[in-house]
Image (tube, rainbow, N blue to C red):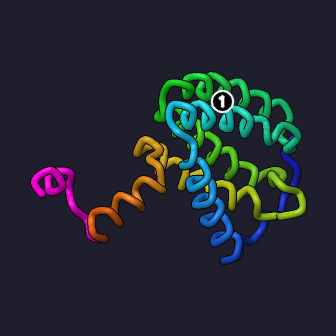
Amino acid sequence: MLSSHAVPDVAVLDIVGSIGGAIAFIAIMSLVREPARRKINAIILAGAGAAYLAGGLGVWELAYLACAAPVAYMGLSSYRFIALGWVMHTFWDLVHHFFANPIWPFMPASSAGCAITDSLLVLWLLFGAPSFWDLAFRRRRLGGHHRTDDDVQEA
């Protein structure tokens, strides 16, 4: 099942593009209000589970999907499960980078790039997927420097 596979090099542009992709995803998803943001993220996670179905690992692709689907379902009500699902997908990205076909056949390092993007999404999700825009505008309203909610109430 596993054939000989040359592990692709990951270039700086692959890393920068992956970070940019994560930032763009977070910025776009931040435009969606709760609870729709959580539900859409769970649906996207479920779809991402099927991304590798013809990825070269045969029945293991189905086994991964069988494990990922219930996690995505539980993500409908919990960002922690969505984060767990992206951790699982990150692992699967790395398996594909080192042993199988890349997620995008025309980009040999795309699975490694996907692992970078997914890892950044995990961090965002573990903080409850806060709106990028709310955080940015809140900081601007607070005078551009970091203040606590207690400072705002006292002012």
The magenta segment: 145-155
Quarter where residue 27 is shown? bottom right
Residue at 35% x, 66% y: name it.
140
Looking at the image, the residue that sits furthest to the left is 154
- Which residue sits at x=79%, y=41%? 51
* Residue 97, x across and y down, in percent: 74, 56
Q: x, y percentage for residue 52?
A: 80, 42
* Amino acid type, label 1: Ala
Judging depth in this view, the residue of 33 and 68 nearest the camera is: 33
Name which residue lies at 75% across and 50% down: 96
How many discs mark residues in the rendered view? 1
Magenta run includes residue 92: no
Relative to 146, does residue 80 appear above or below in the rendering? above
* Quadrant for the C terminus in the image: bottom left
Mark 1, residue position: 68
- Secondary structure beneath dot 1 equals helix
Residue 60 x/y as whole percent: 78, 33
